[in-house]
Image (cartoon, rainbow, N blue to C red):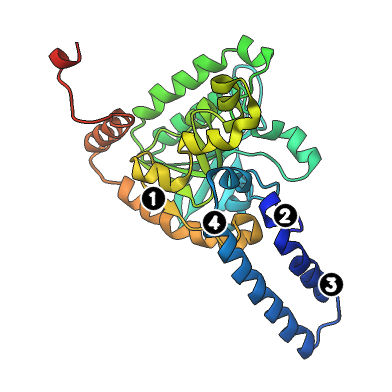
Amino acid sequence: MPTETLEFEESLIPLLKEVDVLSALPRTDARERELERLNQRLRVARTEIYGKLTAWQRVLVSRHPSRPDLLDYVERLFTDFVELHGDRRFADDHAIVAGTACYKDEPVMVVGHHKGGDTKQKIYRNFGYARPEGYRKAMRLMRMAEKFRRPVLAFVDTPAAYPGVESEERGVAEAIAFNLREMAVLKVPVVVVVTGEGGSGGALGIAIGDRILMQEYAIYSVIPPEGCAAILWRDAKRKVEAAEALKLTAPDLLERGIIDEIVPEPIGGAHTSLDEAAALLDGPLHRALELASAPDVDARLARRYEKFREMGRLGADFTDDESS
């Protein structure tokens, strides 16, 4: 069980410590009964806390250091995964993982951000901040999937695209824009899952699909709350207010038609049980893939186009004459 607690989970610390101490003792019937009692109290406490999370608290959950990464889901949901590397232009970006796999015995292409677990891995993965070569690698492999008629499953979890000078020099904006255009016309089914942070264009660069799923405590936004607060109010400390205004939670986005389905998480968030988080994702992912796999390619592309054209539309439809 992860020992990391978030700022709003302080009341859980004594219970977590008791569970850790008991778990280290020799196994006896008495220990098992007490452990079950404590775990039940922990579930009740977590249910109460997580039943009334604010938008900012959901941001913290989405950034939890133990939140499952792409490879955690690959290990639990896919078989025969073979990672493929490089954009054939510059380098291999470790912040984006991609490869062939089988899902329910059907061949698929898996693409997604990867933040890494411990400090060494986070540095190696650049904390999930993808560079231009990451987006170009992703598109290279999506086109390969199209060639071999494999559906694409994209997992989104990034604060944003990498904003460094070298990233700009190599054309990160162009790489993302190119992916948006090309994913919109991929002939194979594309299912997107927002598993953690869906930050800005860095997320959208691999998130154009037929069905968009979002885990219960993930976030998806045009900008992180800190950046929004810094721009709007010149004060990053107003991040809590910005998180509320951005409407970045799964319920907010489902209500506005940005996503198609909310994927439930274990009580206390996906980081509390990787196995349970994967099991809860399995059903919605399979269902979304079946819905996206209609045999009529032209109809699928038309629906995908309309899906994204409708995003952000306010009020009644306007004709060209009215809008001018």
Front residue of this view, candidates 91 and 52:
52
Which residue type does callout 2 highlight? Answer: Thr
Contact, CB < 8 Å: mark 1 with mark 2?
no
Camera-side mark, 1 or 2: 2
**Residue 5: mark:** 2
- Residue placed under numbered mark 3 in the picture: 21
- Residue drawn 19% across the image and 30% down it: 316
Give the Cα distance between marks 4 and 2: 27 Å
Which residue type does callout 3 highlight? Answer: Val
| Mark 4 / mark 1, whichever is N-terminal | 4
Label 2's element? loop
Camera-side mark, 4 or 1: 1
Front residue of this view, candidates 50 and 79:
50
Left or right: 313 in relation to 277: left
Camera-side mark, 4 or 2: 2
Rendered location of residue 3, percent (x, y): 76, 58
Which residue type does callout 1 highlight? Answer: Glu
- Residue placed under numbered mark 1 in the picture: 261
**Residue 77: mark:** 4
Give the Cα distance between marks 4 and 1: 19 Å
| Mark 4 / mark 2, whichever is N-terminal | 2
| Mark 3 / mark 2, whichever is N-terminal | 2
